[in-house]
Amino acid sequence: MIVSADTLWRLNQEYGNRLSKARTYLDLLEQLVVERGSNEEILLAALQFTRAHLNGLKEEYRGWRYTYFYEAADTKRMVQTQSAVRRAISAFARMRTRHENYLNELFDALDTIPRPLAEMTTVPTGDLWEMLRFSLYDLLDFGNFAQTLND
């Protein structure tokens, strides 16, 4: 991977956006399931399991930003020196490997439950169950985005 401040900034922005998108879809899906009166304990438990995993990923990502991405937490100025950028990218790669393992576990868990009825998860813009799964896949597939930074 090319080590530059621009690469680091783009990694941070894209990964943060993907995490936020997954969390937003999860929040909307959970709200919709509750509002539509689903008593499916398995579905609600799966959504809570997903929330716990996403919260863990978000907290680790936040910790990475404050430890490696910023020069100082109070200024939130991104690191600029070559060595600091290299350390941040290396730490990001290690974090991503752990996140991939968590995301694979998450997909395995979600695949064990029956897909909720489309009437319960569909909104005018699409099916929130599918949107959540696609957003989680985008997180899992982040390595392909990172690879494009080398091109």
Image: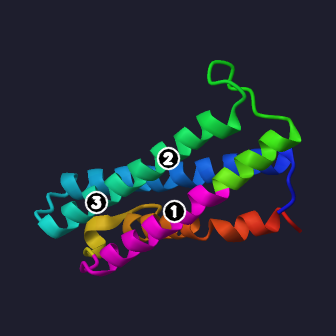
Of residues 119 and 26, which is closer to you in this image? Answer: 26
Residue 109 drawn at (x, y percent): 31, 74
- Is 1 on the left or on the right of 30, as rendered? right
Residue 7 drawn at (x, y percent): 81, 51
* 116 w.r.t. 55: above or below: below
Q: Judging from the image, what secondary structure is the residue with disc 3 in?
A: helix
* Residue interval drawn in magenta: 93-115
Q: Nearer the viewer, mark 3 or mark 2?
A: 2
Q: Which residue is mark 2?
A: 60
Do the numbered discs 1 and 2 sit on residues whose CB atoms are within 8 Å?
yes
- Is 31 on the left or on the right of 12, as rendered? left
Upstream in sequence: badge 1 or badge 2 = 2
| Mark 3 surroundings within 10 Å by alpha-carbon count, few (fewer than 14), some (14 through 19), many (20 or more) | some
Check disc 3 and give the amino acid type: Phe
Check disc 1 and give the amino acid type: Arg
Residue 34 drawn at (x, y percent): 20, 53
Q: Judging from the image, what secondary structure is the residue with disc 1 in?
A: helix
Residue pictured at 89% horizontal, 68% vertical: 151
> Magenta stretch: residue 98 in it?
yes
> Which numbered dot is residue 11?
none
Q: Main secondary structure of the magenta part?
A: helix
> Which numbered dot is residue 98?
1
- Is 62 on the left or on the right of 126, as rendered? right
Q: Nearer the viewer, mark 1 or mark 3?
A: 1
| Mark 1 surroundings within 10 Å by alpha-carbon count, few (fewer than 14), some (14 through 19), many (20 or more) | few
> Which numbered dot is residue 49?
3
